[in-house]
């Protein structure tokens, strides 16, 4: 358990969950390992690299579960994450947010200091120029992906956009290396059938490979063809032409991913441990000391077939209570109630009793906490406290 | 500017907002001072104590703007806040979340260590017993409010509930001091007319005073009559029988409070500074590097007359862009777009340009950050960096 060293004070040394100050973020190590292995096996079966996105876990201890021997390729959502992981020897880092001029300089300065290779994301001529200028300023040759838009989700160029080749040409002129093309099928989160997910994965693959081939036909090497989202990564049946897959939330999973159909409830690796602090029997409410500060304001399941409120409630050992959800949340209060339409009844939970709350969105819940208290299954033992990094 | 000392590294010493790493949390000192003064004047005009809720700001530097001379009475939402402020000499602290047995012990241990007087909140016989036991364990006489429910919002007893006197009797038997009665008109956030807000304030006052009088008639001293929410605190026209008012978000204000009718947009004291990192001109989108990690997932205005998305966009100096909101947010991306139904057009914002985003909910936005970069009006100068505490 070398991982406790990252912050020996986290969790105030609690040895069991009964000793934890609540609300507290729990991480089930067995489920984490299982989730990591599952996607590694699936992507590995195609002979393709998996480049995990560290934005969900933001923890060197979780990264060590993925790369027990030596640092491997990672994706990050902030330059602070890049700096954090570079400090632990990670060198092959994709910064998957469109580069601003200031970010380009800061990222390249990190490369100077640590020998890391930070790869940027761009989709405009202006960004190619800005990266080129940052390269001249720092004396480092910048490397960048051209971001593709495969499903109208957010940023990026359509594979057929004439600007695509123009950006690659401008990169060459500005002294910026073309790392490859990169896409993210973010709209796959809105799907919930196997058929639709397989189709979204194939669309992501085909569109990204198409762009890579177009660039190669125009004289650009385009070595990396990077795709990924947790749903499409799991449902991909063909990765021809793809060189790497990115995914993040697959390590922990959450109720949104469950609603999409990517995981079972039993796969969810994180939860918030909370204490009962009150009740309103006439309303069927039990109040706990976990509000949105601990659970996050994320209501990702509200647009899905089953709205899980602010999360599903389980007993202290992680066994789901039938149809008990966090129906409302204020800053430090959560209200447990029976799901609308259910005929189940509330469990008996005296003041001081503990519950675990499963997340709508693991990235958002985890971001509200500074460390994980690591558990395994139903055992109350805390195996380690793993810190998270934060900020930008 | 003694306040920079709390963390000289915060903001990496940026002297102007152009030097800040984005996304960054800005706090306008002039607006903060004005908001603090406004409620102090209003509550003071009734000769009643204002006990600010520190859950919004979580910062000793903000507390010093309220209490420049010496620490005064405060409200907190976590025992970590109580410990933090006790470390700066604050002694009169109300912990406004229902007490669990573990919280009772921890709060009283803080009293032992620091001489602070932490007042708890209870509404059950079991909590009275638990507090009594914690008192025996620590050798400190616990002090607690009975929590009242004046508008079906969350926890607390109805003023006419027969349990009310039973809880006070049990406290006496268990050796727990009755600090008084406490209510929070949380449903006032759902109102938006002067008439309704004045009525909610009067209902909160009358119900709370009624409970205090009932307890006094039954032989309990009940010295403190504590009410409060930011809307009702501002709209109260009569505080007869009330001894103190609590409020928190009034220091910063936000778009939810604007929608309720408590403040003008120009009163909003915090915002997130973000950088433009992309655009989708065909969709009318501008992408910025502030997603829900920086803005929070709070969508409090979605149930109000005007839905402000994930916040209103302003230029770098804080001037509101007409009808430009953050229409979508992912972890580190925000999408600026024109509000649905508006005929305005998007401003020209090249990559690298800065914007400020105003919060739906100040408590939630601020919680995503570790420090405030303090500014004043349109000036780019950063006057100080004030750290925030977090955790439980």
Image (cartoon, coloured by chain):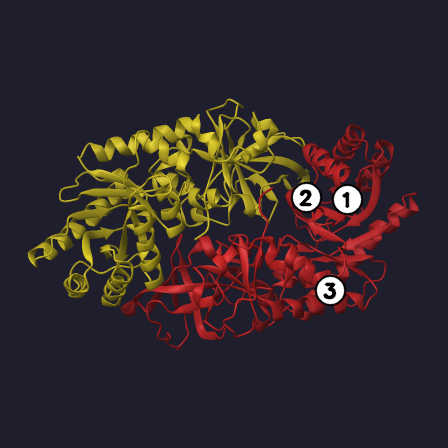
Chain colours: A red, B yellow
**CA–CA distance between discs 1 and 3?**
36 Å
Residue B78 visible in the picture: no
The subunit carrying tag 1 is A
**Element carrying mark 2:** helix
**Element carrying mark 3:** helix
Q: What residue is disc 1 on?
A: A116
Q: Are the residues under marks 2 and 1 on the same chain?
A: yes
Residue A199 tag number: 3
Which x, y percent locates residue A277? 34, 63
* Vertical arrangement, residue A169 with respect to residue B180, above or below: above
* Vertical arrangement, residue B300 with respect to residue B69, above or below: below
**CA–CA distance between discs 2 and 1?**
9 Å
Q: Residue at x 74, y 50 (%)?
A: A90
Residue A83 tag number: 2
Discs 3, 2 touching: Cβ within 8 Å: no
- Residue in the foreground of this view, choosing between B272 and A86: A86
Residue A193 visible in the picture: yes
Left or right, B69 with respect to A306, comes to left
- Residue in the foreground of this view, choosing between A81 and B357: A81
Left or right, B65 with respect to B167, comes to right
The subunit carrying tag 3 is A
Which x, y percent locates residue B192? 32, 43
**Which of the marked residues, 2 or 1, is nearer the chain's N terminus?**
2
Quarter of the figure with residue A237: bottom right
Q: Are the residues under marks 1 and 3 on the same chain?
A: yes
**Which of the marked residues, 1 or 3, is nearer the chain's N terminus?**
1
**Which of the marked residues, 3 or 2, is nearer the chain's N terminus?**
2
| Mark 1 crowdedness (10 Å alpha carbons): few <14, some 14-19, many ≥20 | many
Which x, y percent locates residue A53? 68, 54
Q: For the C terminus of chain A, which image quadrant?
A: top right
In this view, the mark in front (1 or 3) = 1
Q: For the N terminus of chain A, which image quadrant?
A: bottom right
């Amino acid at each position: 358990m070398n991982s406790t060293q990252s912050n020996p004070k986290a969790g105030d040394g609690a040895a069991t969950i009964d000793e934890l100050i609540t609300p507290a973020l729990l991480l089930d190590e067995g489920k984490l390992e299982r989730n990591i292995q599952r996607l590694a096996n699936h992507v590995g079966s195609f002979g393709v690299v998996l480049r995990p996105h560290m934005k969900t876990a933001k923890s060197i201890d979780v990264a060590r579960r993925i790369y027990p021997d030596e640092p491997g390729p990672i994706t990050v959502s902030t330059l602070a994450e890049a700096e954090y992981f570079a400090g632990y020897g990670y060198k092959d880092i994709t910064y998957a947010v469109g580069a601003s001029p200031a970010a380009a300089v800061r990222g390249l300065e990190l490369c100077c200091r640590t020998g890391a290779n930070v790869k940027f994301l761009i989709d405009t001529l202006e960004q190619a120029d800005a990266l080129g200028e940052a390269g001249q300023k720092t004396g480092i040759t910048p490397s960048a992906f051209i971001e593709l838009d495969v499903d109208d989700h957010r940023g990026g160029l359509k594979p057929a956009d004439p600007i695509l080749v123009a950006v690659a040409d401008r990169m060459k002129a500005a002294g910026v290396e073309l790392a490859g093309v990169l896409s993210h099928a973010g709209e796959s989160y809105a799907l919930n059938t196997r058929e639709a997910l397989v189709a979204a994965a194939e669309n992501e693959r085909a569109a990204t490979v198409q762009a890579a081939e177009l660039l190669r036909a125009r004289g650009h090497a385009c070595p990396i063809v990077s795709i990924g989202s947790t749903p499409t990564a799991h449902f991909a049946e063909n990765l021809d032409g793809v060189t790497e897959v990115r995914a993040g939330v697959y390590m922990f999973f959450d109720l949104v991913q469950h609603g999409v159909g990517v995981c079972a409830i039993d796969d969810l690796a994180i939860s918030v441990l909370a204490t009962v602090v009150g009740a309103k029997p006439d309303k069927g409410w039990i109040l706990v000391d976990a509000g949105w500060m601990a659970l996050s304001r994320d209501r990702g399941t509200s647009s899905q077939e089953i709205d899980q409120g602010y999360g599903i409630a389980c007993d202290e050992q992680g066994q789901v209570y039938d149809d008990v959800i966090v129906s409302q949340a204020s800053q430090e209060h959560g209200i447990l109630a029976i799901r609308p339409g259910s005929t189940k009844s509330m469990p008996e939970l005296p003041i001081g009793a503990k519950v675990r709350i499963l997340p709508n969105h693991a990235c958002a819940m985890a971001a509200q906490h500074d460390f994980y208290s690591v558990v395994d299954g139903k055992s109350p033992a805390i195996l380690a406290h793993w810190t998270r990094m934060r900020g930008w």
